[in-house]
Each structure stands twice: as structure tokens, then as C-alpha cells.
Amino acid sequence: MSPSAVEILENCPFFADVNETAFRRLFAIARVVRFRSGQTIFVQNEPCPGMYVVGTGLVRIFKRTPQGRERVLHLVGPGETFAEVAAIGNFSCPACAEAVSPTTCVLLPLEPLQKLIAEDHELCRQLLLSLCLWVKRLVDLVEDLTLRDAAGRVARLLLEKSQRDHRKVRLPTLKRHLAAQLDLTSETFSRVLRRLELAGAIKHLARNELEIINKRKLEELARLE
């Protein structure tokens, strides 16, 4: 059974500090939208439809070069948001979005959201604080690509994805999306995972599920000297 709009918004850390009155106003404009696997949600440079919150499924955000190459910026799972910067800043979509698997989202349409932000200064302040965390995520991504080697990038990714359930990590079915996000080939990504397993840092439980055995080892690999 698909989650309701209220459940999706309540499970989103982006709105964790939004007061009850503002939350009710957000819910009043919220629409549940569903996408099939592989469906395009929006394309870069087109008008932003609004802000999305993922309830179930997975969305990849990517840029397409004039030569047709794709660069995955990040993968968005349940509880996370996308198009938030374009929606709040009221500008065109800076990247493309595509559903990696069947996905259910809440859409906060652009015009009603802009109206709420203009009328509710407290909501505006709370959204600004949440955007600061989004900017930090981008800084972490740049840090990954410029300062960490392949093992360090994979180690940090696994640590990040294990925060909610402590030890277990579930990877998307198509690992090439994760590899692209880390600026690695699929072969390199798989090779690093095998090396980490041989080193006793992780253990494969199923095709797309891992368990972290030695967290300290991963932290050492991810640490910047």
C-alpha cells in the first residue's frame, strides 16, 4: 500500500523543524504523484514543476552534456527531496530527474509553494535551514570527487547509507547509478566492494544487500588526512 501525502511529508527530515501550522499548509497543497521505472520526471532547463519528496522508490538526478553523456549527481530515496533549490529559488530545473524504480512522491507545486514562502516567514526560515544541509551534501560530493580515491568514496557512501539501520546497506538494483554518482565505472565499483569484503570490512548478504562488519575500517578509508 502506497504511503499517504501526510506520511511522506512526516517522514522527510527536510520538514522536521516545520511547525504544525506550516505543515498543515504544506499538506493542503501537496499532491501524490507516481512514476513507473525509467520514466522521466523532468528535464534540465525546463520550468520547475515544484518540490518533490520521495515516499517510495528511487530517483536519479543527472546532467546531460551536449555530447549526450550523463553524469549522475545523486540518487534520491525515501524521505529525501529533489528540485527543492529550483522550486524555492523559482528558476528552471538545473538537471534531469528519472525514476530508477516504481516511485511514489509528494509534489509541492511551484506557485502554491512560492505563495506559502512569501506569506509565512517562519516557514521560509525553516526551509532556509534545511537548504543549508543540502548545500553541505553538495560540498561532500565535491570533496569525494576531488580528494578521495575509489575506496574512500565507496567507504563513505556505505557509511552514509548505513546510518538509518546501523549496519545493513541496501543498494539499488542497478549499481551503475551508484558508480556513476561516485565517478567510477561499474567494474571499479564492484572491484572495490570485493576488496572491502576480502578485507573483512563488509559482507554480502544478498545480491543488493550488504552488512558492515568493520565500521572502523571503512572510517579509516573514508577519512581525509
Image: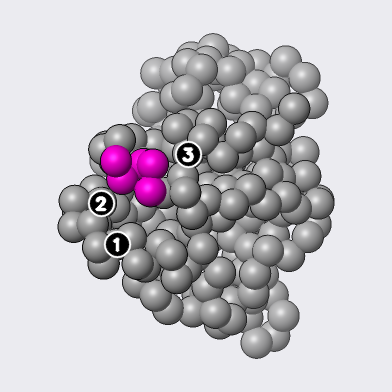
Q: Is residue 132 visible from the viewing direction of this image?
A: no
In the rendered image, the vertical position of residue 43 relative to residue 122, given as above or below: below
Q: The N terminus is located in which quarter? A: top right
Mark 2 or 1, nearer chain start: 1
Residue 6 belongs to the span the image colors magenta:
no
Q: Determine the residue located farthest toward the top in the rendered image.
A: 213
What residue is pinned by disc 1?
117
Residue identified by numbered label 2: 123
**Position in image of residue 64 (x %, y %):** 64, 76
Percent coordinates x, y for residue 19 in the rendering: 26, 38
Q: Dot 2 surroundings within 10 Å: few (below 14), some, or many (20 or more)?
A: many
- Residue in the picture at 51% in, 63% down: 109
Per the rendered image, the range of residues in magenta is 21-25
Position of 65 with respect to 14 (left or right) is right
Q: Which mark is residue 9?
A: 3
Amino acid type for the residue under numbered disc 2: Leu
Badge 2 vs badge 1, beta-carbon distance below 8 Å: yes
Kind of residue at badge 1: Ile
